[in-house]
Amino acid sequence: MTVANSPAGKRWHDMGGDLDHPLAGTIPKADHDFAIWEKRVDALVVLAGKKGVFTVDGLRRVLEDMGEDAFETMTYYERWVAALNQNMLEQGIYSVAELGARMEQVQARGTTYGEANDAHA
């Protein structure tokens, strides 16, 4: 799968050197703080990798197979958490049913859960 305006052989997620891509331009160099959930996703990816749940290649495989829409609509860490989840499901760490039940528990906490802790992260 290639982007219509990309050189032959490049997949849609390979934006390097494509100056016509809408996201091309100056890279912001100012430091910025990450949201607590982004820090947690990063930590989960590192821990899962160290535990041997998946490899960088496994993470990259899922990221690259997500499709162009994911790269256009999801943030960096949204894609990472989706790839981590897919790898965890594939490895049998938890099932879709277990994930769904846990998501219901988290949703039941409400929107203010963790706000006090987020300020100290």
Image (spheres, rainbow, N blue to C red):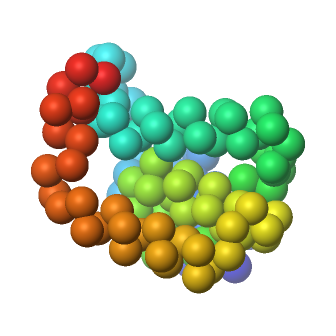
How many marks can you see?
0
Task: Between residue 106 and residue 65, name the one nearer to us.
Answer: 106
Task: Between residue 55 and residue 111, name the one nearer to us.
Answer: 111
In this picture, residue 64 sits left or right of residue 119? right
Q: Using the rendered image of the protein, determine whether residue 87 is visible from the camera's viewpoint.
A: no
The quadrant of the picture occupied by the N terminus is: bottom right
Q: Residue at x 18, y 61 (%)?
A: 110
Percent from the top left, x then y, of residue 29?
35, 19
Percent from the top left, x then y, of residue 43?
56, 33
The quadrant of the picture occupied by the C terminus is: top left
Q: Residue at x 46, y 48 (%)?
A: 77
Compared with residue 74, is residue 114 higher up or lower down, i.e. above or below?
above
Q: Residue at x 72, y 42 (%)?
A: 48
In this picture, residue 6 sits left or right of residue 9? left
Task: Between residue 93 and residue 33, name the one nearer to us.
Answer: 93
Quarter of the image holding residue 97?
bottom right
Compared with residue 108, is residue 47 higher up or lower down, i.e. above or below?
above
Q: Using the rendered image of the protein, determine whether residue 4 is visible from the camera's viewpoint.
A: yes
Percent from the top left, x then y, of residue 16?
60, 46
Q: Residue at x 49, y 77 (%)?
A: 100
Quarter of the image holding residue 5?
bottom right
Compared with residue 36, is residue 29 higher up or lower down, i.e. above or below?
above
In this picture, residue 90 sits left or right of residue 95? right
